[in-house]
Amino acid sequence: MKAFVTGATGFLGSHVARVLAEEGADLRLLVRPTSDLRNLDGLKADRVTGDLRDPASIEKALAGCDVVFHVAADYRLWVRDPAEMYRSNVEGTRAVLEAARKQGVRRVVYTSSVATMGFSSIRGNVADDVTNNVADENSPVSLADMIGHYKRSKFMAEQAAFEAAKSGVDVVVVNPSTPIGERDIKPTPTGRIVVDFLKRKFPAYVETGLNLVDATECARGHVRALEKGRRGERYILGGENLTLKQILDRLGAITGLKSPTVKLPYGFALATAVVDEMVTGRILGREPRATIDAVRMGRKMMFVSSAKAERELGWRTTSVDGALQRSVNWFQANGYA
C-alpha cells in the first residue's frame, strides 16, 4: 500500500506516518519548502514538495498513491490574517479531495477535530457537565456554533469532505479530541499547556475541560478508519474527559511541580485575553499566550464519547498518563522548558 500523508512534519501527522511505516506502508509525504523536517528523522519515506494552497502541486504529489491521509491543518487559536487559515484548512482540503478524485485513490482519511462537535456551555456543577453534556457524532451543531476561525475553518473543511463523499470520493472523517504526546514541535495549544506548566506559568486555572487522547493511539485509530470506516461517516477518536484542573494535577504528579489551586473567574480570564491580544498580538505582532477565542471556548466542556469508533473501528479508550509523561519528557529533552 502506498500512502500519501499531509502534515507528517507536524505533531499528529508524524504519529500517523510512523504508525503507517510500522504496519508496512510505503510512504509519500508532502512537505513545504519551509517545513521543519525534524519529525521525519529516521523515517523511511519519499518526500515531495508542495503546498495545500497549490492544487496542481497536490495532484502531482499524490499521483500513483493508493490511499491518502490528510492530516495537515493550521491549528492556532489566534492568527493575524484569518484568510490564511481558511486557505490552508478549507481550500487545501478541497484541493486534496479533488486531487484524490482525479487520481482515483482507493480511500481518503480526513483528519477533522472534535472542535466541530456540538458542545453545551458550563452550567452549575462541573460533575453534571461530565455526566450529561458529553458530545458525540450526532450532537446538534451548525457553523454558527463555531467559536473562532480555527473551529469555523475545520467545520467548513469537514462539510467539504462530506460533499466529496456524496459525489463519489471514498472519504472517511476522523475527529481526534486533543492529542498529547511527543514531537509537538510548534507546540500546539495543548502542548503549550504542558510547556507553560513546566515553566511555572500556571499560577491559576479556569473552569473548563478537554478530552485528551494519546497521539500514538490516535494515529492507530486513523489506520483503523482506513480499514473499517464507512464512507461519508465520521468517528470521534477520544481518550479521557478531564477538567483543566485534573490535567494540571496529573502534570503535577508527573513532574513534582505544584499544581495551581486558585480558580480564575471567567470575566477576569476574558479581560486578560483582551489585553494580551491587544498588546502581544496587535502591537508586538506575536501570538498571544491568552486569546479571546480560547477563553470563549473554555465556557464549554469539550467532553466527548468515542462509542461509535469503539463499535465500528475497534477503537479502545485508554489512559493518557503515559502520553502526558512522554510529552513532559520530550519537551524537557528538547529544551522547551
Image (cartoon, rainbow, N blue to C red):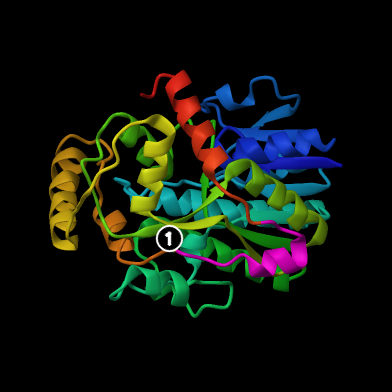
Residue 117 shown left or right of residue 261 in the figure: right
Residue that numbered label 1 is attached to: 151
Could you say which is closer to the camera, residue 318 or residue 95? 318
**Picture quarter with the N terminus:** top right
- 235 vs 64, left or right, is left
User: Is 334 left or right of 266, judged from the image as shown?
Assistant: right
180 up-or-down from 178: above or below: above
Magenta stretch encompasses residue 108: no
Q: Residue at x 61, y 47 (%)?
A: 71
Residue nearest the observer in this picture, 273 or 287: 273
Highlighted range, magenta = 303-316
Label 1: element kind? helix
The quadrant of the image that shows the C terminus is: top left
Q: Amino acid at mark 1?
A: Lys
Q: Residue at x 67, y 41 (%)?
A: 16
Task: Count neighbours of disc 1 (C-alpha within 10 A) and say few if under 14, some if 14 to 19, many if 20 or more.
Answer: many
Give coordinates of residue 302: x percent, y percent.
43, 63
